[in-house]
Image (spheres, rainbow, N blue to C red):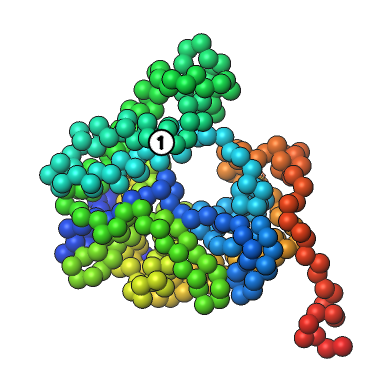
Amino acid sequence: MGTSAELPNATAPALPGTGTGASGDGAGASGDGTAGGTAGGAREPAMPGAPTSLSPSRAADFMRCPLLYRFRVIDRLPEKPSAAAARGTVVHAVLERLFDEPAERRSVPRARSLVVGEWERLLARRPELAELFARPGDAPAEGPESGPGGEPTGEVSGPELARWLADAEALVERWFTLEDPSRLEPAERELFVETRLASGLRLRGIIDRVDVAPTGEVRVVDYKTGKAPRPEYAAEALFQMKFYALVLWRLRGRMPRRLQLVYLGSGDVLTHDPDEADLAAVERKLLALWRAITEATESGDWRPRRGPLCGWCDFQAHCPEYGGTPPPYPLVIQPRLPLDDAPGSDG
Ligand code: SF4
């Protein structure tokens, strides 16, 4: 499998001849399990509102808990703004934007100086994030990720925000200990990719950065603002990267040479050099996943799966595992033929 998981404190190895970096992010780059009128796998359910494609994050949702996938993709239930997610978006934007500067200006001070501007840009797009940073006089905040429970004041300031911005700047600065942006010229940043497999399954996502060496070898890079996983969870972390590698391989006919996860929270770099067997296995896994999603979509049978991340799930009030009730299923449940009556069966 050619895995070269370099933990901890590995420095980002440059591809031979690469003096390059590549592209941006998306606080979790990924496409979405968008809803529409088809389903994939090998068949086309043609059900309005059914998922039509798979992204790494939604695939991970389904593996974690099918009911969570349903709430996000089919019901599209709202989720509370998260300070951690917002910080990830800002940090990714800074890392992406820094490559607009000439190489000699890609310094720590310059990168740190971009943080406030990117936060203001994000706030303009998503004014609801103001509630993450209540000022004195607002309802008391329970913590940076819980929101104050009060109405936004319109002006966002105060010690909570100052701490949050300082954390974002520290993450940006740590990046310079892992990679040297003055030596990188990304081929692509924030690259939206989408492909349809032979089976009909549509895969999509957003890749933070793509580096291309003079030899043509491709490195796919993703930034994480959290900490690197323990070695036993590295395969799970690499799933997203293999997903991107599969999509690029199918789109461009050439497999990425290296996949690289840059963990700004802990200062680690995790790399993996994929091979054909590796990506074929990921494709089989995605097809199986899509079959399960299609069956659940048609039957309306979305099972909750309790796990250690339930504590961070915004949907506990709707989850039977926590005494809640899901909202009425918004799709038409497809009748199932008894096996004896199924097309192609005898009799
Ligand atoms: S609380 Fe846990 S089991 Fe319930 S929907 Fe969320 S992730 Fe699934």
Q: At label 1, which amino acid type do we have?
A: Leu
The residue sitting at 38% across, 68% down in the picture is: 248
Quarter of the image for residue 297 reads bottom right
Residue 138 falls left or right of residue 249? right
The residue sitting at 46% across, 54% down in the picture is: 30
The quadrant in which the N terminus is found is bottom left
| Rendered view: 154 above or below 168 | above
Residue at the right extreme? 347
| Rendered view: 208 above or below 280 | above
The residue sitting at 61% across, 57% down in the picture is: 35
| Image coordinates for residue 86, horizontal then vertical, percent | 44, 36
Q: Nearer the viewer, residue 329 or 163?
A: 329
| Rendered view: 55 above or below 182 | below
User: Ligand 1 sits in which quadrant?
Assistant: top right
| Rendered view: 62 above or below 267 | below
**Residue 338, visible in the rendered structure:** yes
| Image coordinates for residue 191, horizontal then vertical, percent | 36, 57
| Image coordinates for residue 259, horizontal then vertical, percent | 34, 61
Say what secondary structure mark 1 lies in: helix
Identify the residue position indicated by label 1 in the image.
Answer: 122
The quadrant in which the C terminus is found is bottom right
Residue at the top extreme? 137
